[in-house]
Amino acid sequence: MSEREQSPGAGTQSGADWRQQTSPGIPVAGSSPASGSGYARPAAGPTWPDAGYGAVGGGGATAPVYSTTPVTVRRADSFAGLLLVLAGIAAAVTLLLRWLPGSDLFGWELVRRGLDDAQRGGAAELFDTGSWQPLAVTLGGGVLFVLGLLVVLPARTHRFLGVLALLVSLVAAAGVLVPFADTGWDTTAFGTGFWFAVAVPALGLLGALKAMLTTPRYGTR
């Protein structure tokens, strides 16, 4: 009898020993992970910190958080700026025209007389001679022109500039209403330059009210 026939259990034992001689971490066929036969579970992936965004779905993708709180939108008030700039242009035109019919004095000469009176006698001299009126119109028109340029710039609101334009327009309005009232509201007593002077406070008041009454616009980001 051969040696293999004499030891029938040796092959069975050696076969069992061969099944146990596997590489570490590779499961043996027919075994389960809970059998403790060398099965290795895969390691968990890296855990990323929460960046403060809400996860979309289960794939770990993130989406930015959008605020629904209303914020004031910066914008320009083009129409108010146009009215104030036109007021400044009307004031400049008055310098090139005669305020009184039959007079040789142009608007820039009346302004120069007012500046001379201010240097000579101060405010009292201006009011005694009435030369403050052309100064109020022309200088007020220059201020309105600058305010018109500022109103065109984007801002949350232009109410402060509108208030300033309103005050300047009221001073310019006094510069044309006082001489108009002194003549008994006679429209024939004034020349073309004076009517351009009337346009200065009129356009200034409209532009100031437009800037003051325009409400802020709100949006989300």
Image (cartoon, rainbow, N blue to C red):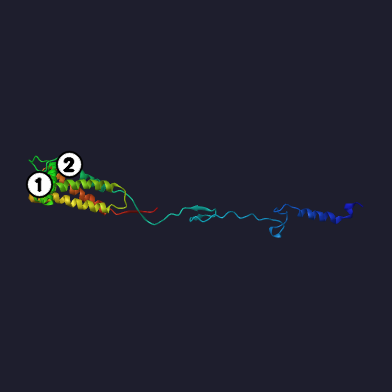
Q: Nearer the viewer, residue 123 or 221?
A: 123
Instruction: Please provide percent x and percent y for residue 77.
Output: 28, 49
Q: Is residue 36 left or right of residue 155?
A: right
The residue drawn where x is 15% and y is 47% is 135
Figure check: 51 above or below 149 = below
Residue 121 visible in the picture:
yes
Q: Secondary structure at mark 2?
A: helix
Residue type at the position of mark 2: Val
Asked which quadrant contains residue 12, the reply is: bottom right
**Residue under label 2:** 93
Q: How much space separates mark 1 and mark 2, taking CA atoms?
A: 19 Å
Checking the image for residue 166, the label placed there is none
**Residue under label 1:** 187
Residue type at the position of mark 1: Thr
Residue 198 visible in the picture:
no
Instruction: Please provide percent x and percent y for residue 48.
Output: 54, 54
Asked whether the beta carbons under mark 1 and mark 2 sit within 8 Å of each other, the answer is: no
| Neighbourhood count class around disc 1 (C-alpha, 10 Å): few under 14, some 14–19, many 20 upward | few
Q: Nearer the viewer, residue 91 or 29?
A: 91
| Neighbourhood count class around disc 2 (C-alpha, 10 Å): few under 14, some 14–19, many 20 upward | some
Number of the front mark, 1 or 2? 2
Q: Secondary structure at mark 1?
A: helix
The residue drawn where x is 89% and y is 52% is 3
Mark closer to the chain start, 1 or 2: 2
